[in-house]
Amino acid sequence: MKKTKLFNKKAIIVIPIVLALILGSAGTIGLLGGFNPAENNPQPSELSEEEIAKLIAEQFEELKSSIDDEAVLSIIDIHENLDDYIDTTQTLETQFFEFEDGYSIGIEYFFDGGDSLLFDIPADFSNIELPETVREFDWIKVTGKIGTTEEADNDHTHTAPIIYVTSIEKIDK
C-alpha cells in the first residue's frame, strides 16, 4: 500500500486562481475603460472595489457557463457554497493528483481554446490505505466527508474545502 500524506497545502484551488486571473484582466479593462476613440486620447478610469467585484463575478459566471463537465461544476459548487457541504458525504468521479506535500482530487479541464485549469479539492487519505495501483492522473471514484482547511497563499490564508476520503476505487474513463 502507498504511504499516505495528510493533504496538499499547495493544491491548486480553482477559485483563488480564477479570481487572480480575472483581477489581472480587470486592471487592463479598467485602464482601457475610459478610452474615447473620437478623442484618440486614452484616459484611465478608476474602478471601485464594488465594480471590480461585480466584474469578477460576471466573468466567473461566464467561465462557468462554458464548462460542461458535471464533476467540475460540482467541485466549483463545493468551493462556492462550502457551508452547505460541511460534514456531508460526497461521492465524486475525478482524477487523482499527488503533490510534494499531499494529494488532491479533481479534474484538469480543457477549454475549447486548448487552455486548461485544474479544478480540485485537497484530499486526506489518512483513514484508508491508498491502493498501490492508483497513480497520478488516474480516474478514481472517491467517497468522503467534506470539511475545511486553511490554505496559505503568498500574503494571506483562506478557508478551503477538504475531503476526508473513506473509500477509493480506480475507474476507467
Image (tube, grey):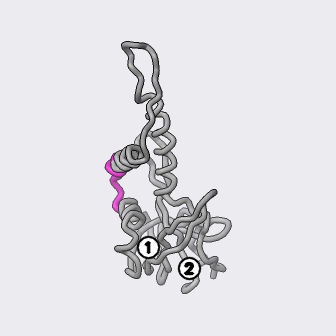
Q: Is residue 129 magenta?
A: no
Instruction: Answer above or below: position of 54 versus 107.
Output: above
Q: Label 1: state its secondary structure.
A: strand
Q: Can see residue 71? A: no
Residue identified by numbered label 1: 141
Q: Quadrant of the C terminus?
A: bottom left
Chain part drawn in magenta: 62-71
Local packing at callout 2 (Cα closer than 10 Å; few below 14, some 14-19, many 20+) is many
Q: How far apart in space, not on screen, are marks 2 and 1 (Cα)?
A: 13 Å
Q: Residue at x 40, y 42 (%)?
A: 112
Dominant secondary structure (helix, strand or loop) of the stretch shown in magenta:
helix
Q: Quadrant of the N terminus?
A: bottom right
- Is 41 on the left or on the right of 11, as rendered? left
- Is 133 on the left or on the right of 108, as rendered? right
Residue 68: numbered disc: none
- Rendering quarter of residue 145: bottom left
